[in-house]
Structure formats: C-alpha cells, structure tokens
Image: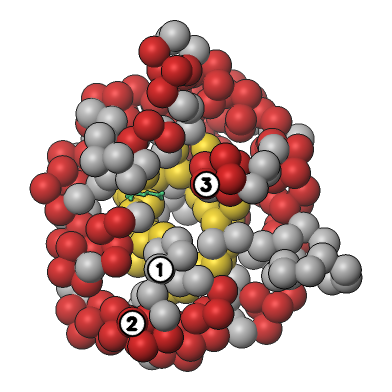
Amino acid sequence: MRSKIVAGNWKMNNNKGETQNLLSDLKKGLPATEAEVIVAPAFVNLAQASEALEESSIQVSAQNMHFASNGAFTGEISADMLLSIGVDTVIIGHSERRAYFGETDDFLAKKVETALSMKMRIIFCFGEELEDRKSGSHFEVVGNQLKNALFSLPEEAFQSIVLAYEPVWAIGTGETASPEQAQEMHAFIRKTLSQTYSESVAQEISILYGGSVKPANASEIFSKPDVDGGLIGGASLVAADFLAIVKAI
Ligand code: PGA
C-alpha cells in the first residue's frame, strides 16, 4: 500500500537522556496526520524508544542490521535482536554505510534478503554522487543500484520495501535537489519498477526523498506527485523542525 511517510534518521546522535527528551517532545507535539511517522535512533536506544512509543503512532526503525542470523560478527546486530525488542523496520543501504563501511550492492542484497525472510519492513536507500550527476549518469547509477540490490526479488517482496532516493551530494550539505530533480528521479524509479515488475508494483510503493529536507523546503518537495514523503537527517534531531516537516506532508 502506497503511504505517505516521514522518517527521521538520527544517525550517531542522542544519548539516552537526549533520546528520552526528543521522543517525549515528538509524542507531545505530533499533529494529526495521514503520514506514517518513523524515527530511527541508534541501536543502544532502540529498546527505550520502542517502549516509550508503545502507546504512540510513531514507529521505530533501526538504522542498519547484519545479514547473518547470529554468530561471530563482533559489534553487529541481527534481525532477531531487533524484532525481540519490537523493532520491525530497518534502514538498509544508507549512503554513509556505503561510503564509510564499504557496503556494496551485493552485500546490501544479502541484508535485504534476510530482512524480508524475517518479515521486516525495509527502508532501502540509494542515490548518485555529485560526479554522477555532473556527468549525466545519475539515472544509470540509480538504475544499477536498484537492479543489483533488489531486482532479483520476487514481486511480492516490494510490499515490504519503501524506497528512499537520497542524492549523496544533498545529504547533510544544505544543498537540496530541486523539487523538479526529485520528481524527475522518482518518476524514473517508478518507470523502472513498472518495466521490471509491473505497474502495480510501481504505483503501490512509497518513494521518499532524502537530502537536506527542512521545514522551509519540505512542502514544495512533498507536493510532487511521485514523492511520498522524506527521510530526514539533521532536521529530525530538532523536535520542532521534524514536526513541521510532518505537518508539511
Ligand atoms: P540530511 O540527511 O537530512 O541531514 O541531509 C538525510 C539522510 O542522510 O537520510
């Protein structure tokens, strides 16, 4: 089901007390909205978040997970561990994981497979770098990222996947893709899904935009027909800003 979604990726921010404060401000201030609202705190604060939000419509996502079910992977977290604390959504493929932790499309495909086999919902991130856009290869790069990590999946898998297009040059830089650039890429993604799978996969999937979304630019970006919401980094750390972005949808 295609739904509107605003998700906050907190990255490596907020200790226990800060997590508590931000969650409490979000709960208090959450406006009536048709959008699904999701927050992704750091691993150590997920259990706390999941408890604090038990009575709230705000959902909790992890920022990452390992593809193995368990074993000798020091420092890693499994799908089962997440599910056991009530977290059934996971961000996979964030550009920071790709850039700083060497996560390749093939590696991400394994994570996707595991998450799906554990019946988790995936927010799958991808997007081109600045030089790809400058050289005009951004559609090809995005098409390949999707193909390599997702296009071996059966059609029904896409019911559990949300896509997040995040041009790397717009993440944390203050530089946003223009609403037209976002719309153009989202339309391309839908066309690619329609050609690879079916029109219903293309129309049913939620495609989020991420990269310097702020209260000031959110409503224009969200007004585009193929943009179903946003994955928000920096602005999700300030309750008033995140709530203003939720209101903008
Ligand atoms: P940003 O991050 O909103 O700070 O640009 C977005 C993201 O990395 O998901």
Residue to which mark 2 is pinned? 18
Q: Do the residues labelled 1 and 2 touch (CB within 8 Å)?
A: yes
On whether ligand 1 comes within 8 Å of the CB at mark 3, the answer is yes
Give the numbered dot on residue 13: 1
- Left or right, 103 with reference to 1: right
Instruction: Name which of mark 3 and mark 2 comes first in the sequence.
Output: 2
Counting labels gives 3
- The residue beneath circle 3 is 96
* Image-quadrant location for residue 18: bottom left
Label of residue 195 in the image: none
Crowd around label 1: few <14 · some 14–19 · many ≥20 (10 Å):
few
From the top left corner, tell me how far across and down residue 42 is, in percent.
Answer: 50, 71
Q: Could you say whether the residue bearing mark 1 is in a helix, strand or loop?
A: loop
Q: Within 10 angstroms of label 2, few (less than 14), some, or many (20 or more) residues? A: few
> 92 or 234, which is in the foreground?
234
Cα–Cα gap, marks 3 and 1: 14 Å
Circle 3 SS class: helix
Q: Which amino acid does label 1 sit on?
A: Asn
Eyeballing the image, is 59 above or below 180? below
> For the residues marked 1 and 2, what is the alpha-carbon distance in whole angstroms?
9 Å
Residue 97 point in image, percent of width and height: 58, 48
| Residue in view at x 43 percent, y 10 percent | 136
Mark 2 residue's CB less than 8 Å from ligand 1: no
Viewer can see residue 218: yes
